[in-house]
């Protein structure tokens, strides 16, 4: 009996190591492609590893980590209030000297992405088996926008908190699930989705009988606390807790209007030139359709209602804005689809290889575009 227990622990350790190895190899691929793309574009390699993906929103997070939010509306940094505070806070906490703050941002993202790997493995194994778990890690690692796990963006932190919250909720550990939900909603607006999703999971476990409600339900509402904390910060800095909404509309030209989002994406296809015709037009529409397909499949497979709810709400949030230019990145947040794909391709080599080739090729392509500073979600 003792030998069997030891053997099971050994097997778990080996499969977990394999999952981590897959994730690390994918990271090496991403950075290698980034370096090569920059060399091909400029004739020189980047001076530092921090320069590979330090584009678009990334410097804004670092600026917040350095200087906190700006209260002067005449300065451009005032517009950074739309970025939630937890990731910049962690960057600052990990910074020894401000000269190395870009390294801190990279370290936080990559450490958190390792946690992502471990928890999606644990969650998939909890739902299915180790083979499905390894494939879930593989498909997440080579998703076309997975380079954001290696960039100074919130993807790694948000995914780590969200997937871990799911994992503990599925085990009825509501204190942990709710606390992680709090941090998720302090990282991104999408963290608020955990409130209804965890409630769905809670009552699913209670067999939809309200009479079985106990005090553990209170932990779930911590997912709201992170967002409320952000509103307090917004109010202290700007004098209005909802300034981020007006800035999102006026400075970032984004508002709640999915029809306009689809129209703008289509117009990009008909009027933009390469590569924007792809990154601003074709890809956002294609990934929006792909997200719908994944929702249909997960409903067909009769997944737990919390997974279906999260998939649908994540998709709806991704396509809810007047600009769909970040849809491919936001669709990646529908993480149950990686577990679903792992289950659907279990013992199906041709399907697995096909996904690896297509997804891996797109990952390399979009990574190269992003690394040289062009828009890529």
Image (cartoon, helix red, strand yellow):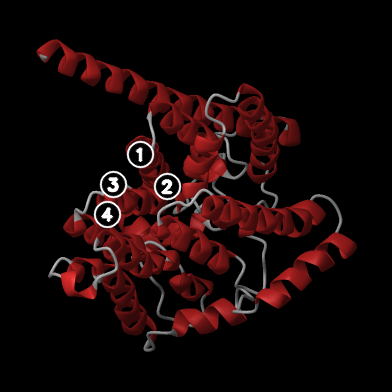
Q: Is residue 6 above or below residue 70?
A: above
Q: Report the residue marked by disc 4.
A: 169
Mark 2 → mark 1, Cα distance in angstroms: 8 Å
**Disc 4: CA contacts within 10 A as few (<14), some (14-19) or many (>=20):** many
Residue pointed to by mark 1: 111
What secondary structure is found at the residue carrying circle 2? helix
Residue neighbourhood size for the residue with mark 3, other residues' Cα within 10 Å, grouped as few (<14), some (14–19), many (≥20): some
- Label disc, if present, on residue 94 of the rendered structure: 3
Name the quarter where the C terminus is drawn: bottom right
Residue furthest to the right in view is 270
Among the two numbered marks 2 and 1 on one chain, the one whose residue lies closer to the N terminus: 1
Ranked by sequence position, the earlier of labels 3 and 1 is 3
Q: Earlier in the sequence, mark 2 or mark 4?
A: 2
Q: Where residue 237 sits in the image (x, y, percent)?
A: 35, 80
* Proximity of marks 4 and 3: CB atoms separated by less than 8 Å: no
Of circles 2 and 4, the one toward us is 4
Q: Residue at x 34, y 84 (%)?
A: 235
- 341 above or below 291? above
What whole-number distance in Å separates the C-alpha atoms at marks 2 and 4?
Answer: 20 Å
In screen coordinates, is 174 left or right of 156? left
């Amino acid at each position: 009996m003792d030998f069997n227990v030891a053997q099971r622990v050994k097997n778990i350790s080996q499969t977990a190591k394999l999952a981590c190895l897959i994730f690390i190899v994918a990271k090496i691929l991403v950075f290698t492609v980034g370096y090569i793309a920059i060399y091909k574009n400029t004739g020189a390699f980047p001076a530092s590893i921090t320069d590979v993906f330090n584009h678009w929103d990334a410097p804004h997070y670092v600026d917040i980590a350095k200087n906190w939010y700006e209260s002067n509306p005449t300065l451009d940094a005032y517009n950074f209030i739309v970025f939630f505070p937890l990731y910049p806070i962690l960057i600052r906490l990990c910074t020894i000297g401000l000269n190395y703050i870009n390294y801190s941002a990279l370290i936080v993202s990559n450490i958190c992405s390792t946690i992502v790997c471990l928890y999606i493995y644990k969650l998939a194994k909890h739902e299915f088996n180790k083979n499905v778990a390894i494939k879930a890690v593989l498909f997440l690692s080579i998703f076309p926008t997975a380079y954001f796990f290696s960039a100074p963006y919130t993807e790694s932190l948000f995914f780590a908190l969200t997937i871990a919250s799911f994992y503990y909720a599925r085990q009825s550990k509501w204190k942990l699930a709710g606390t992680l939900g709090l941090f998720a909603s302090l990282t991104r607006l999408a963290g608020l989705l955990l409130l209804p999703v965890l409630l769905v999971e809670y009552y699913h476990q209670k067999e939809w009988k309200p009479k079985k409600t106990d005090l553990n339900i209170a932990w779930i509402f911590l997912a709201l606390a992170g967002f409320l904390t952000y509103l307090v910060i917004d109010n202290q800095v700007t004098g209005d807790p909802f300034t981020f909404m007006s800035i999102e509309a006026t400075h970032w030209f984004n508002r709640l209007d999915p029809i306009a989002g689809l129209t703008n994406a289509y117009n990009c296809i008909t009027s933009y030139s390469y590569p924007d015709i792809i990154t601003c037009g074709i890809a956002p529409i294609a990934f929006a359709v792909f997200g719908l397909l994944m929702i249909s499949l997960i409903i067909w497979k009769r997944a737990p209602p919390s997974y279906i709810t999260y998939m649908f709400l994540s998709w709806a949030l991704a396509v809810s804005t007047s600009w769909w230019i970040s849809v491919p990145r936001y669709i990646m947040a529908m993480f149950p689809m990686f577990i679903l794909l792992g289950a659907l391709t279990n013992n199906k080599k041709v399907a697995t290889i096909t996904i690896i080739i297509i997804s891996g090729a797109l990952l390399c392509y979009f990574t190269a575009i992003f690394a040289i500073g062009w828009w890529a979600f």
